[in-house]
Amino acid sequence: MDAWDEFGAQPDRDPDFGSDHGSGDHSGQPPLTIEERAGVLDDLAELEVFRTLLEPTGVKGIVVDCPDCQEEHHVDWALMQANLRQLLDEGQTGRHEPPFDPDPDDYVSWDYASGYADGIAALAEREEPSGRHGTGRHARED
């Protein structure tokens, strides 16, 4: 799942859905479905893996294609995590200012980060001292 798809307006939602669905004012936004919540929780877990693996290499965050302005947004690790947590808690995210004059080389796409994590996992499986070779499957496939 691409985390950016979870942000912004969700036209398939009923705007007349009651606002009595948890604490706080969510401007009539219905809560996430069980499947949507599971997807956001998966994204949060993946983001933590990506950050753990990529931040030490100098990667500052994720680059996402904005469906509203058709531009790339460079989102640092902490802001991406905050956006996903807000989405989980409130069913939507607010608008955030992108970093000033980011260096595009400091950010990677969600797909790149996922492929990098899969590659590290596959390498670790091959180097496992037990001699067992793993299946090479992605964690989400279990």
Image (cartoon, rainbow, N blue to C red):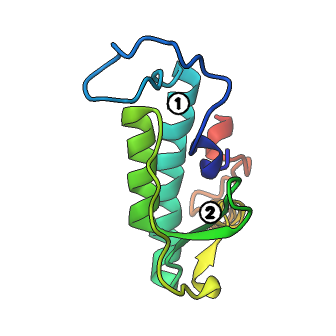
Q: Are there few (<14), some (14-19), or many (20+) residues within 10 Å of tag 2?
A: many
Would you name the residue on which mark 1 appears?
A: 38
Compare residues 98 and 76 and report the one nearer the observer: 98
Give the vertical position of 41 relative to 53 (above or below): above
The spot of residue 118 in percent (x, y) is 67, 59
Extreme residue in the left direction: 23
Q: Are there few (<14), some (14-19), or many (20+) residues within 10 Å of tag 1?
A: few
User: Which residue is at a point 49% across and 78% down the rendered structure image?
Assistant: 60
Give the vertical position of 108 relative to 86 (above or below): below
Give the vertical position of 87 relative to 2 (above or below): above
User: Which residue is at a point 65% across and 60% down the rendered structure image?
Assistant: 110
**Tag 2: amino acid:** Ala
The spot of residue 32 in percent (x, y) is 50, 25
The spot of residue 35 in percent (x, y) is 58, 24
Compare residues 29 and 6 and report the one nearer the observer: 29
**Tag 1: amino acid:** Ala
Q: Quadrant of the N terminus?
A: top right
Query: Which numbered mark, 1 or 2, is in the foreground of this view?
Result: 1
Compare residues 127 and 57 and report the one nearer the observer: 57
Left or right? Give the position of 129 relative to 26.
right
State if disc 2 and disc 1 touch (CB < 8 Å). Answer: no
Left or right? Give the position of 85 relative to 49.
left
Question: Mark on residue 117?
Answer: 2
Q: Quadrant of the C terminus?
A: top right
Secondary structure type for disc 2: helix
